[in-house]
Amino acid sequence: MYAFRKEASKNDLLNRIHYLLASIKSYLYRFSFPNDNLYSVLKSIESNLDSIESVDEATAGSYLINVLNYLENLNNKYMWLHG
């Protein structure tokens, strides 16, 4: 039997990133307030997501994957510490 791997769409990545941003902000509000450095990183990510349509597909895809990996690791860290 062949393994089937579904490619994630750009919208799937954006939805997951927005979910992770909300989750991380929730942990920050509860356990690590104020954390200006991390808040500025999250604001920068949100700002970049707002203008993601203005860059070419390869750059946008690479950025989304990098941001997703960063946020997944950060969210996992907060879940492990405070979950």
Image (spheres, helix red, strand yellow):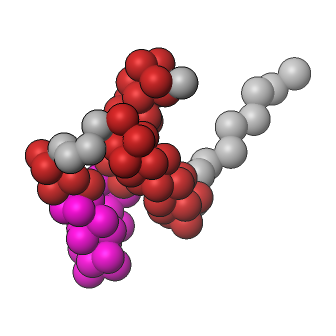
Residue 23 in the magenta stretch? The answer is no
Q: Nearer the viewer, residue 24 or 60?
A: 24
Residue 75, compared with residue 81, is above or below; it is: below
Q: Which of 10 and 72 is in front in this view?
A: 72
The range drawn in magenta is 43-63
Image coords of residue 48 (percent x, y) = 24, 67
Query: Taking 1 as reference, is 56 left or right?
Result: left
Query: Taking 42 as reference, is 21 left or right?
Result: right
- In this view, the residue farthest toward the right is 1
In which quadrant of the rendered image does the C terminus lie? Answer: top right
Q: Nearer the viewer, residue 70 or 30?
A: 30
Image coords of residue 81 (percent x, y) = 42, 19
Which residue is at 21% across, 53% downward? 39
| Magenta highlight: main SS | helix
Residue 79, compared with residue 59, is above or below; it is: above
Q: Which of 75 and 9 is in front in this view?
A: 75
Q: In which quarter of the image is residue 11?
A: bottom right
User: Visible in this render: residue 81?
Assistant: yes
Residue 43, compared with residue 67, is above or below; it is: below
Image coords of residue 43 (percent x, y) = 23, 62
In which quadrant of the rendered image does the N terminus lie? Answer: top right
Q: Quadrant of residue 72?
A: top left
Q: How many marks?
A: 0
Which residue is at 26% across, 44% downward? 33
Which residue is at 53% across, 54% downward? 19
Residue 58 in the magenta stretch? The answer is yes
User: Visible in this render: residue 69?
Assistant: no
